[in-house]
């Protein structure tokens, strides 16, 4: 099935304010708290994002780069991972909206992007 709009899943280290800012622009965003998935491993968070067909947003560059490589090596697919440098929630949301407005969910599959 083809998907047009990216839906986000925010890792627990990402400010929930970002979810609110993105939603205010009409995009879907789910936090780990809302999903009832606090304190889960990075692997479990990525697996959940995949099961829900969401792009994972995190600040955790090292671990999620490694997980993306493991997915690739195993021939597994993910919906995309966006790694954000720690900035204000407003700046992260601004950068996210560029992706959300110009990249489809299908184009984001198996991609690792940095903002």
Image (cartoon, grey):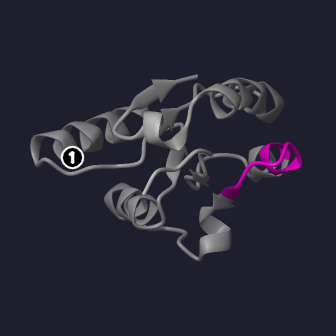
Bin the neighbour count of mark 1 within 10 Å (Cα to Cα): few under 14, some 14-19, many 20 and up. Answer: some
Q: On the image, which quarter does residue 45 sit in? A: bottom left
Residue position for label 1: 71
The residue positioned farthest toward the front in the image shown: 1
Is 1 above or below relative to 86?
Answer: below
Q: Residue, x 50% and y 48% (percent of image)?
A: 56
Query: Residue 88 versus residue 74: which sits nearer the camera?
Result: 74
Q: Residue, x 20% and y 51% (percent of image)?
A: 76
Q: On the image, which quarter does residue 61 sit in? A: top left
Picture coordinates of residue 70, whole percent (x, y): 18, 44
Residue 106 is one of the magenta-drawn residues:
no
Picture coordinates of residue 22, whole percent (x, y): 78, 44
Quadrant assignment for the N terminus: bottom left
Q: Which residues are magenta?
A: 21-29
Residue 27 is one of the magenta-drawn residues:
yes
Query: Residue 35 versus residue 63: which sits nearer the camera?
Result: 35
Quadrant assignment for the C terminus: top right
Picture coordinates of residue 87, whole percent (x, y): 71, 25
Answer with left or right where residue 77 lies relative to residue 52. Answer: left
Q: Residue, x 53% and y 36% (percent of image)?
A: 59
Picture coordinates of residue 46, whole percent (x, y): 39, 56
């Amino acid at each position: 099935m083809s998907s047009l709009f990216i839906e986000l899943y925010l890792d627990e280290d990402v400010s929930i304010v970002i979810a609110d800012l993105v939603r205010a622009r009409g995009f879907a965003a789910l936090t780990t708290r809302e999903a009832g998935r606090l304190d889960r491993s990075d692997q479990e968070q990525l697996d959940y994002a995949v099961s829900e067909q969401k792009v994972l947003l995190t600040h955790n560059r090292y671990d999620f780069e490694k997980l993306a490589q493991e997915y690739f090596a195993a021939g597994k697919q993910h919906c995309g991972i966006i790694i954000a440098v720690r900035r204000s929630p407003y700046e992260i949301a601004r950068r996210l909206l560029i992706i959300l407005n110009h990249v489809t969910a299908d184009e984001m599959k198996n991609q690792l992007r940095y903002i």
